[in-house]
Image (tube, helix red, strand yellow):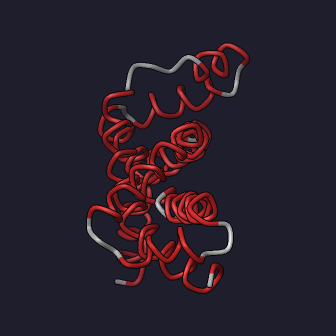
Amino acid sequence: MKRFFLAAAAAATLSLSPLCAQADDADDLAREIGVGGQLIQNIQPLLPMMSNQVVTQFKQMGLPLMDRVERDGKGGLPRFKEIFEEEFVAALQTQVPELDSNVAQMFRDMLTAQELKDTKAFVNTPAGKKFLGALTGAQGELQKFGEKAGMRAGSVAGPNAIERAEKEMF
């Protein structure tokens, strides 16, 4: 009986090996492609526009803090915008693990275990690295993940920026 359970456990482990390899290769591939890091890098040029928009929205909402920031805040609106941008990037960075996980799952859904292994090997070659630099095939799906992460980061960054501005500017 003991041998039966050991044999069954071994068979189950062996049957799961391709799935585990697929998961590991998909996770590795997602990390190597670095979608989360690219998102943060690509968002940098947009931060000034975003912080301007947030200030406009906060003013339209009638937040008393905006008047105080302009009138009495150390550094005024430019400092508030810096704080918002810092908080946005910090909040976005917390989204990177989920973003990488979404990308890994997308790869698992698109590729077999062997294809993942082959793709992982390819992206570590000079040609693979060049391909990654020009990656465009999955941009639509990746953009959706990034937009979702950005919306979440924005919902965290706004309140955090208000709280920090209260502490740092008054």
Figure check: 64 above or below 14: below
Q: Name the spot of residue 29 as percent of width and height, x first.
A: 55, 39
Q: Residue furthest left?
A: 61
Q: Name the spot of residue 126 as percent of width and height, x first.
A: 73, 17
| Count of picture labels | 0
Nearer-the-camera pick, 102 or 70: 70
Q: Name the spot of residue 84 as percent of width and height, x first.
A: 53, 63
Nearer-the-camera pick, 88 or 9: 88
Q: Is residue 66 left or right of residue 8?
A: right
Q: Quadrant of the C terminus?
A: bottom right
State which quadrant residue 93 falls in. Answer: bottom right
Q: Residue furthest right?
A: 126
Q: Name the spot of residue 115 as percent of width and height, x first.
A: 44, 28
State which quadrant residue 118 falls in. Answer: top right
Q: Residue furthest front?
A: 71
Q: Is residue 90 left or right of residue 26?
A: right
Residue visible at 59% across and 42% down in the picture? 44
Figure check: 53 above or below 121: below
Residue visible at 56% across and 59% down in the picture? 81
Residue visible at 55% across and 66% down in the picture? 87
